[in-house]
Amino acid sequence: MVKQGVVPDDLTRPFFEAANEGRLVVQALKGSERLYFPPRSASELGCSPDDLEWREVSGRGKIYNYCVVYDCPVASLKEDIPFNLAVIMLDEDPGILMYSHLPGTAPDEVPVGASVRVIFEATANGQKVPEWEIVS
Amino acid sequence: MTTQMAPESMYRSTEGLGIWEHRGKVAAVGIGHSPTARRWDGRAETSVGALSIQALRTAIADAGVPPDQVDGLVLVPVTTTGAHWPADQPVPMDVVNAFNPTDDPLDGVGQLSAEWLLKNMPELTNVKFTMYAPGCMSAAIVVAAQAVGDGLASNCLVLKGWHNLEGRYNHGGISAADEVPGTFAISPGRTLWGAPGCYGTALQFAQYCTKYGKHHDMMAPFMQNSRRNGLLFPEGYWAQHRPEQLTPEDYLSSRWIAKPANLFDNDIPIMVAAAYLFTTADRAQDMAQKPVYILNHASSRGVARSITPTLEEVETETATTGRKIYEGAGITADDLSFENMYDGFAQFHQFHIEGLRYRGMQPGDALDFYQTDISIEGPNPILASGGNIGSGRSRFWMHTDCMQQIQGRAGARSLTGVKPEIAVSGGPMPMGGNFTVWSATPD
């Protein structure tokens, strides 16, 4: 599956630059365990931009649950239906969730709760994004 | 007159507010519906503006109020079911000029303003209070109820209109782009991963089934009941255009959209408008219809922590909403004669009614409850209106049904297993919506 290309913007650039380097980072409040994903602006969080940082995480998680997509609005993914669309909980903080197509896992054969690890997948314009595969 | 969006202070969105200060002092009296259509056919007389005027005039006549005594108007300016007017497509000026236009040619075609309505309803000579509410009728009702209670208007119209254009929404625009901005790529809802509109709810439902050992097939009695009730709703889309019962076999054999949500778990977008007339409890005594008193309104403002709301976040929020609904009305779950919580997506409904603890339900109980008698003839009616599943996407059938049942004019849909005395309706989302408690008596 080739996802639409991604053009990083100010808010998300550190996330996508890290992905190109094979690292998974999540926005965090300095001096705190608190993580934010998707990232928020400092004004939205009511803090100074200097209070925020990007923290590298292990890239390990578990499958929260999933659906099988049969009717997809994104043109470039339509030829791939049906496909899994799972939500991954990070091991560091299960409240932080990321989407995954679970590459390598057949549609509707998803073990809910299974451990996964991050991989990085190139989108249509070469920008990499995190994906997740089941740890066997 | 400049119309503002209702301030957040008009909503009751936290617990601990006590009994609503206007409990039983505001009443709904008049009801007006336009006809329905699957999509707009391009004619002026079927535009969302025309449908809205028709609904408003019907509600005024139904209440028996002279138009010049209407002094308030609360409406939702956004009318789209999902598709906005294409930027590269000219607005049909024959339609625009069939009405008294405002500076925005989309007024009456792809949106509504209070200014446009008042320009095209010259009989409304005394409207001094206008206000916008976001999203859907559930919000407009809350704002109008609060406004009447606060004395901002005495005879207040409440309006929601919907337009539905050709095409499949969310399938063009950024979904068809070669590249997307980074913020969009990892934003909640529609993202790089291709989630359809029902995905978030389907995911919560999948987790619900995992957590409580349930299955999508268990939705079938609810779906059948909703369509049945909808076909008894003469104002609704299915009753007017496709009077077909939905059998469990029809439902279970339907194509998946995002498994475990299939086509029928999604409501059908339509053209329609509805209006109500709210007034004070005192004034309502002299009007043409039996008053339906408002005991409380409550709002939910749940915020998902990450990329999509989890089942656990939804359950926390709906339980909080249930407590707010009962607290402000001064009632308990045992006082509800029936419920009309939101259902479009169908898989919202169990979250709402479990949050209400309707008929003693706890989280995880609703699908088993659906296997019992949930009909309008039984003691435990579920979604007496049939909701969006039963009549198409309007997000207001549930409110109309609460009023009509309590007024004793729900026709073939009339409840017979319970006496309709107190009901709750509202939505849309379990994580964010507005809810109203209706009563046959002010106390």
Image (tube, rainbow, N blue to C red):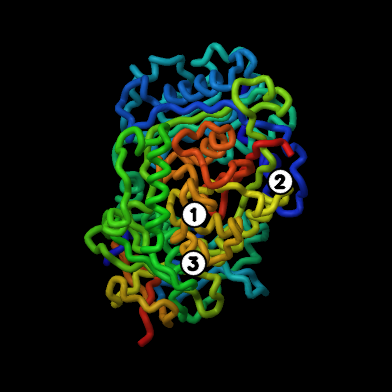
Q: What kind of residue is marked 1?
A: His
Hey, what amino acid is under mark 3? Pro
Q: Which residue is mark 3?
A: A14
Query: Mark 1 or mark 2: which comes first in sequence?
Result: 2
Residue B361 seen: yes
Label for residue B349? 1
Q: Secondary structure at mark 3?
A: helix
Number of residues whose C-alpha sits closer than 10 Å to that of mark 3, classed few (under 14), some (14–19) or many (20 or more): some
Q: Residue A20 in the image: state x and y as whole percent.
A: 39, 72
Q: Quadrant of the N terminus of chain B?
A: top right
Label 2 neighbourhood size at 10 Å, few (<14), some (14-19), many (20+)? many
> Relative to residue B126, is residue A19 drawn left or right?
left
> Which residue is at a point 40% across and 63% down the rendered structure image?
B218
User: Do discs 1 and 2 share a chain?
Assistant: yes
- Label at residue B329: 2
Label 2 sits on what residue type? Ala
Is B111 on the left or on the right of B303, as rendered?
left
- Counting from the top left corner in percent of width and height, residue A98 is at 45, 68
Q: Is residue B441 left or right of residue B52?
A: right
- Closer to us: mark 1 or mark 3? 1
Observer-nearest of B124 and B3: B124
| Disc 1/disc 3 C-alpha distance (Å) | 40 Å
The percent position of residue B428, horizontal first and vertical second, equals 52, 47
Q: Nearer the viewer, residue A69 or B194?
A: A69
Query: How many residues crowd around disc 1 within 10 Å: few (fewer than 14), some, or many (20 or more)?
Result: many
